[in-house]
């Protein structure tokens, strides 16, 4: 059985994912993050829940999403993962969020990515 969904409704894969230790799936985190490009997909919420306890271990993967051109993916990552970050956000993520919040691209502004970045920074009492 595979823990990476084959389609947006592949809930058996997410159930299997939840049965596995993180070390088993670590190398496939980028593939799992792709399923968070649309949080309306049924597989997205369970994948986000699975990844939340391991956010400290996937910082570089999260930065890769924040540095991508996919604005809705950034939006969903900020709301569904970064908002649950345990402890202090790493400086490189904070700096990237500040850039998005202060000087968003036209597409980031259209998709309100700047607003969710600013909201998260404000929630964490980080000056923008």
Image: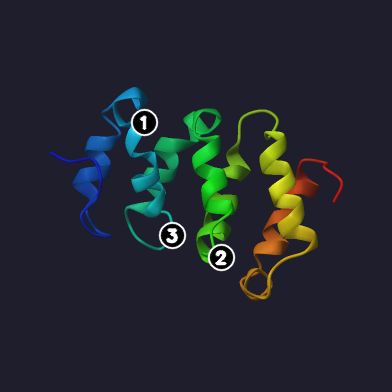
Q: Which residue is mark 3?
A: 37
Query: Where, by quadrant of the figure, is residue 68 drawn?
Result: bottom right
Q: Which residue is found at the position 26% from the left and 29% from the top?
A: 19
Q: Which residue is mark 2?
A: 71
Say whether residue 68 is left or right of residue 33.
right
Say whether residue 119 is left or right of residue 70.
right
Q: Which residue is found at the position 58% from the left and 54% from the top?
A: 67
Q: Position of residue 5 (x, y in %)?
A: 24, 50
Q: Which residue is found at the position 85% from the left and 51% from the top?
A: 128
Q: Which quadrant does the N terminus fall into?
A: top left
Query: Where, by quadrant of the figure, is residue 9 drawn?
Result: bottom left
Q: Secondary structure at mark 1?
A: helix
Say whether residue 85 is left or right of residue 18.
right
Q: Secondary structure at mark 3?
A: loop
Q: Residues within 10 Å of mark 1 (few under 14, many from 20)?
A: some
Q: Earlier in the sequence, mark 2 or mark 1?
A: 1
Q: Is residue 122 above or below residue 76?
A: above
Q: Which mark is residue 26?
A: 1
Q: Residues within 10 Å of mark 3 (few under 14, many from 20)?
A: some
Q: Position of residue 13 (x, y in %)?
A: 22, 44
Q: CA distance from mark 2 to mark 1?
A: 24 Å
């Amino acid at each position: 059985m595979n823990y990476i969904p084959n389609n947006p409704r592949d809930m058996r894969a997410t159930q299997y994912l939840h049965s596995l230790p993180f070390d088993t799936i670590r190398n496939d985190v980028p593939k799992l993050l792709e399923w968070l490009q649309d949080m309306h997909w049924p597989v997205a919420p369970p994948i986000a829940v699975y990844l939340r306890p391991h956010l400290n271990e996937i910082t570089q993967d999260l930065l890769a999403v924040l540095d991508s051109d996919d604005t809705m993916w950034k939006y969903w990552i900020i709301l569904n993962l970064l908002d649950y970050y345990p402890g202090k956000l790493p400086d490189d993520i904070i700096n990237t969020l500040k850039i998005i919040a202060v000087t968003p691209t036209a597409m980031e502004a259209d998709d309100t990515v700047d607003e969710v970045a600013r909201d998260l920074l404000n929630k964490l009492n980080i000056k923008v």
